[in-house]
Amino acid sequence: MDAFTSTVDSQTIWLNGFDYTGSIMSIPICYWYENKDKDAGKGFMPAEILERAFYMAMKEFPILAGTLKSNASSRLYVEIDKNNLNMPVYTDSFSELNYSTLCKSGYSIRKLPIDLSGEYGVPVPSGLVGGSIKPAHIRIIRFKENSGVLVYASIAHYITDGYGYTQFMNRWSEISRWLQQDPQGSSSALLPVRRYVHDRSIHDSISSSSTDALDSFVLGVKSGGNLVTRWLAWVSPETRARVFKALSDTISHKCSFFHVSSETMEVLRARVQAYAPEGVRYSTNDVIASYLAIVVAQAKEKASADRWWNKSIPMAVCKTLENSGLSKPAPPPCLAVLIPVNMRTRISHPDAKNYMGVMVSGKGIPFTHEYLQQGPTDKTLSEMALKIHEALPSMNERFAGQVGNLITSEPDIFTRQVLGMATGSQKLIFSNQSRFAHYRVDFGAGIPSMVRHAPHAFNDVVYIMPANPKTGGCEIEFNFAPDVEANITSNNDWMKLVDTYDSY
């Protein structure tokens, strides 16, 4: 730890609109490593090396020792005070469980001897009052008989996004490998030099007060303010986090994991491609997002119909009121499919690829539930994939600059966004990390056997994660209400596509 604390400088990093939205969420990911050489003894991911490498990596990510604060105008910033550092929680412990036991349980973190539920949802300070939000929680768990290791890292989302997260994890593991080759760290020239940019001024260069590139879905947040959102923006980051954590704790979650092979995805993509307009080539992501939107919409529709409070007023009564003129027909319900995009490749700033702050934006693409009830025919999937495919190019530098400015144009825009995400039911949020380098995180004992995202703080979120390179394909992780999840797993069309299924 001294390698970091003795060299860090005090500084203030002012956050931007994209960071704001992530200020009540974390990025919690589990890296599972099996020890296939049980005789390796302490040589398997040695504790002292991992810890030393972590603090060396922190020297290049000093924001991980900062404190989230807000000023009188509710503007958020991270203060790094070298005399009062807000260091991450870092523990290295042993478990009486065997690694194989966790494998058989579907790599369920809920079977671990440590309760991580307080760390993988909304990041909150410990205790009911006081304290600061910890920027990161790192848990190293070593399993019985030297059978394997879990590296769990939960990093607050205002620090970075999925891309920046994998940059940090790969730098940590890179330093760990280097230290094992040179334990004294004397050959510093052998450690590759990396550049990581944490200063948020990159957003200033693209910020724009215009809104001509924004659609009605994005602009919808301008009309959603109320006393609750304004209060949430006014209170301290710690109080706001505790409120959202309490809200999250009232929501029933079911987390499920599916593996889809590369061959299955390509066969499906090729079938859907046959209905594409000339000159348009769908990506696998276009098609799988469309397919999942249909599966989720059908599951939500069935769950809604089965809930007792929706059965208490028969449809006949509603129709009678509409026919009598006493009630206007409600607009057809829509499912908003939110497709986030890593904007670094779409921004011309020379430091874009090295930028470690949040640089993810997205568009909501609405589909009516009536349309989605048609089922996943190739023609329907092609129509949906085309909408998604055509929406992505418009998320360019101008779009990113306008979204970032919009979020900070009023103090409570970001609390409106987060509250809508937490409480709205007609949404489907994708987080596609399939191209991020999770399976390059090698601490010196090989790549992970499995990488899995821990449950999200709220429902209606789908993670598309890379699968182990030996397996190929992708891992799809669902976070839904239990009745919605049950309907998804009873959907025969969907279950025919997947190879494996785990849930907890």
Image (cartoon, grey):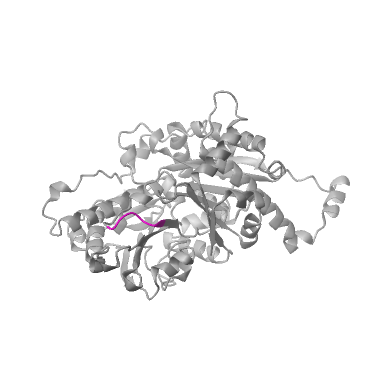
Seen from the viewer's position, the closer of residues 38 and 72 is 38
**Residue 79 image offset from top left, x and y in percent:** 31, 55
User: What type of secondary structure mainly makes up the magenta span?
Assistant: loop
Can residue 480 be seen by looking at this rendering? yes
Quarter-of-image position of residue 306: bottom right
Residue 167 forms part of the magenta stretch:
no
Position of the N terminus, as image quadrant, is bottom left
Q: Compared with residue 259, is residue 371 higher up or lower down, i.e. above or below?
A: above
Measured as percent of width and height from the top left, residue 500 is found at 53, 56
What residue is drawn where x is 44% and y is 41%?
404
Can residue 118 be seen here? The reply is no
Q: Is residue 204 above or below residue 357?
A: above
Image position, residue 218 (x, y; %): 55, 40
**What is the residue that sits farthest to the left in this orientation?**
186
Q: Residue at x 33, y 62 (%)?
A: 36
Of residues 428 and 418, which is closer to you in this image?
Answer: 428
In this rendering, would 263 be left or right of 5?
right
User: Left or right of 84: which side holds 246?
Assistant: right
Q: Horizontal and vertical percent for residue 458? A: 54, 58
Query: Quarter of the image holding residue 31?
Result: bottom left
Residue nearest the viewer, comparing 478 with 101: 101
Magenta stretch bounds = 445-450
Residue farthest toward the top in the current orientation of the protein:
278
The stretch drawn in magenta includes residue 447: yes
